[in-house]
Image (cartoon, grey):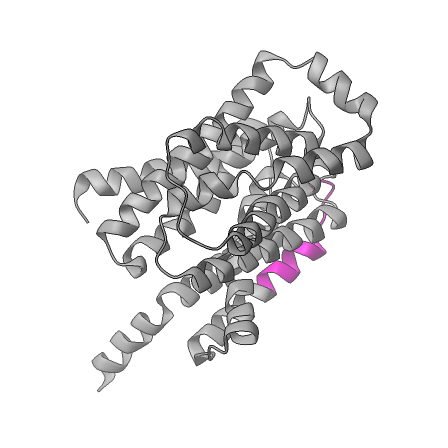
Amino acid sequence: MLPKDLLLALVVIIVWGMNFVVIKIGLDDMPPMLLGALRFLLAAFPAVLFIKRPQIPLRWLLAYGLTISLGQFAFLFSAMSVGMPAGLASLVLQSQALFTLLFAVLLLGERFRLVNLFGLLVAASGLLLIGAQGNGLMTLAGFVLTLCAAAMWALGNIVTRKLGKVNLVGLVVWGSLVPPLPFFALSWLLEGPEVMASALRGISLDTLLVLAYLAFGATILGYGLWSRLLSRYPASQVAPFSLLVPVVGLTSSALLLDERLSTLQLVGALLVMLGLLLNFCGGWLFGRLRARLA
């Protein structure tokens, strides 16, 4: 990978890793469903006026928007509002890779490779350790809701696989048209019109900056650069960079929010990262090992 493209990859990882700290700050002043509605409203407008709609059936665009946008972030924002720390959220959400593997087997008829199964078991054991250790920072509800967010992300990945080759930026922007109305409806039902009105009347500069970061930084810039990298290099060369997102998430949350992991949570985090690494690169690693032993 060229140095300038390596720099772009690192920019994306930092932007996406910091995303969780920014969400946590935003939830201090705004209820989760309303935050989701405004985030995707800004991500869609005015970008849809300048970015071409992907040539896919409407049902698939709706499926993408309802899973990877509405479902994922409704669960994630709810999780972080009920006690899921930003750093652990960035890590546990990466279990989407494991859910994607499972859904691909169940829904697309793909087959497990032995190394994938081993990586799945290693990561699952790490998640169990994390879930068993609340240590006053993490709630069980927050942990379970984050797993639900990861599952919705994985379903969105399955939709993307069914679509085949598609402009990722166009898909993300036009898919952002789907969540705002459901998010506003959920906010009305779950948070109440009084809370919505109060949050909108008292919106602060910090909240506006949070929304700008989530909509333009994490969504438009992040996916735009990621799409550019995927267009220049094989997915196998680009995808492993996503393993650095929880590293940035855990580091930034420790520095900016003073979040700390217990010893068992740290062990669990390392197991999750190892499981994800095996899932991404295990075939190549075991192939090299067999070649050396042969």
In depth, the one of 232 and 245 nearer the eye is 232
Residue 279 magenta: no
Left or right relative to 15: residue 24: right
Residue at 35% in and 66% down: 281
Residue 130 magenta: yes
> In this picture, is 29 found above or below 73?
above
Residue at 57% in and 12% down: 205
Left or right relative to 232: residue 208: right
> In this picture, is 263 found above or below 277?
above
Q: Where is residue 208 in the image (x, y as percent from the top left)?
A: 56, 18
> In this picture, is 223 found above or below 116?
above
Residue at 58% in and 57% down: 268
First to last magenta residue range: 125-137
Q: Residue furthest left?
A: 2
Residue at 47% in and 78% down: 112
Q: How many marks?
A: 0
Secondary structure mostly taken by the magenta-highlighted segment of the chain: helix
Left or right relative to 31: residue 158: left
Whether residue 146 is visible here, answered yes or no, is yes
Q: Position of residue 189 (x, y in %)?
A: 81, 36
